[in-house]
Image (cartoon, grey):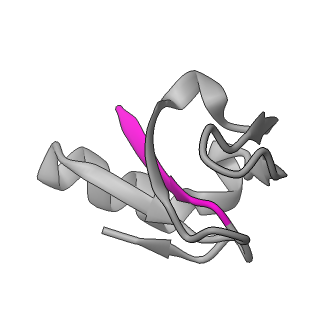
Amino acid sequence: MQIIAKCPDCSNNWLLESSAADRRITCPSCGRLFKIPKLDEVCKAVKIIKKSKGMIYVDEKGQTYA
């Protein structure tokens, strides 16, 4: 599974592996450090991703979108 994370500063999107969940990452564009939520915090999105076999988007507030 892959996660799309959006930097809260520069708004660039990054495609990440699920192993990035519950970690802090540094935006490759602007250098901002931000946290990717735990996968269990995005339970609804995980259910959607299992059905769709696609990707999920998690914004800086932890809101998820498929």
Which residue is depicted at the point 18% across and 47% down? 54
Residue range of the region highlighted in magenta in the rendering = 1-7
Q: Is residue 10 left or right of residue 26?
A: left
Where in the figure is residue 32, as x and y percent of width and height? 81, 52
- Say which of 44 and 25 sits in front: 25
Where in the figure is residue 13, as x and y percent of width and height? 45, 57
Q: Is residue 5 magenta?
A: yes
Q: Is residue 22 left or right of residue 12?
A: right
Q: In the rendered image, which quarter is residue 6 located in? A: bottom right
- Say which of 43 and 6 sits in front: 6
- Say which of 17 and 7 sits in front: 7
Q: In the rendered image, which quarter is residue 65 located in? A: bottom left
Where in the figure is residue 30, as x and y percent of width and height? 70, 51
Q: Is residue 65 left or right of residue 51?
A: right
Which residue is depicted at the point 78% across and 44% down? 31
Which residue is depicted at the point 35% across and 32% down? 1
